[in-house]
Image (spheres, rainbow, N blue to C red):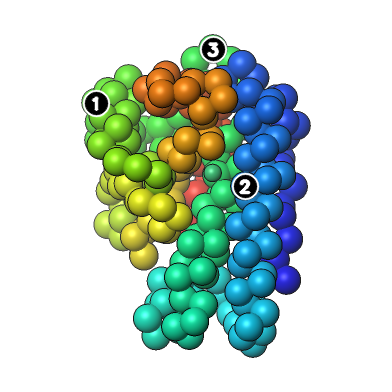
Amino acid sequence: MYTLPKLPYGYSDLEPYIDEETMKIHHTKHHQKYTDKLNSALEKHPELFEEDLSELIYGAEKNLPEDIRFEIINNGGGFLNHSFFWNVLGEPKDEKNEPIGDLGKMIEEQYGSYEEFKTKFKAHAMKLFGSGWAWLTMNKSGTLELENTVNQNLPSEGKIAIITLDQWEHAYYLKYQNRREEYIDAFWHVVDWKKANERLKG
Ligand code: MN
């Protein structure tokens, strides 16, 4: 059985950038529902509880029986993406909150500066139509890449996810309504760059 993971901070700790009510509903209602639906789909084929969930999804055609395939892609993806997203976020440390360590250097080398990177990330994220996720990943040759995925799809197989931003309306609508760009700007204040830097090791 999959269980809803605890948040590594309190619901109000990301204020004012991400508000308490959004965090509460997002975690206890939305993420909980993905978790519940994932479990009820897997109960039809309980042997699959033993398998690695992301491998099941990446090899869905081969690894998932047809009767639960789309439920697992959607709800298993929702479970994994949110579990990851909560650890992308963290309490704002200071006004700047800039990337650190090797990741900070890579961002500067590849994008020119952190400011340039943020501009490119936002422009790319805004290209997403409908619900989905904006990712910063690293490919096998060590290059950073921007990727959007629709619905609850995972980032491309074989890439290391560094950070992601939930772009479903449920992630920002209470505070930002239709102002998705403002939500993206606010996101930078609550990225945990220490954890992001650690992900480079794979
Ligand atoms: Mn969400």
Nearer mark to the viewer, of 1 and 2: 2
What residue does disc 3 label?
95
Residue at image x 27%, y 57%? 141
For marks 2 and 3 on the same chain, the one whose residue lies earlier in the sequence: 2
* Residue 87 drawn at (x, y percent): 60, 43
**First of labels 1, 3 by sequence position:** 3
- Rendered position, 37 above or below 113: below
In the rendered image, which quarter is residue 117 located in?
Answer: top left
Residue 85 lies, in percent from the top left, at 55, 44
The span from disc 1 to disc 2 (Cα, nearest Å) is: 37 Å
Residue 169 in view, yes or no: yes
Residue at 31 percent of width and 55 percent of height: 139
Q: How far is mark 2 from mark 3, CA to CA?
A: 30 Å
Name the residue at 73% across, 71% down: 1
Callout 1 secondary element:
loop
Assign ligand 1 to one image quadrant: top right
Look at the image and tell me whether residue 50 can be seen: no
Inter-mark Cα distance, 1 to 3: 21 Å
Are the two marked residues, 1 and 2, in contact with CB atoms closer than 8 angstroms? no
Placement of 100 over or under 160, stated as above or below: above
Which residue appears at 50% of the width and 49% of the height? 199
Q: Quadrant of residue 10?
A: top right
Q: Under 8 Å from ligand 1: the CB of mark 2?
A: yes
Tell me whether circle 1 and circle 3 mark residues in contact (CB < 8 Å): no
Comparing 113 with 164, the one in front is 164
Residue 16 appears left or right of 67: right
Q: Name the element at disc 3.
A: loop
- Compared with 157, 91 (above or below) is above
User: Which residue is labeled 1 in the image?
Assistant: 112
Tell me which amino acid carries mark 1. Answer: Gly
Q: Which mark is residue 30?
A: 2
Q: At which x and y percent is residue 43? A: 67, 79
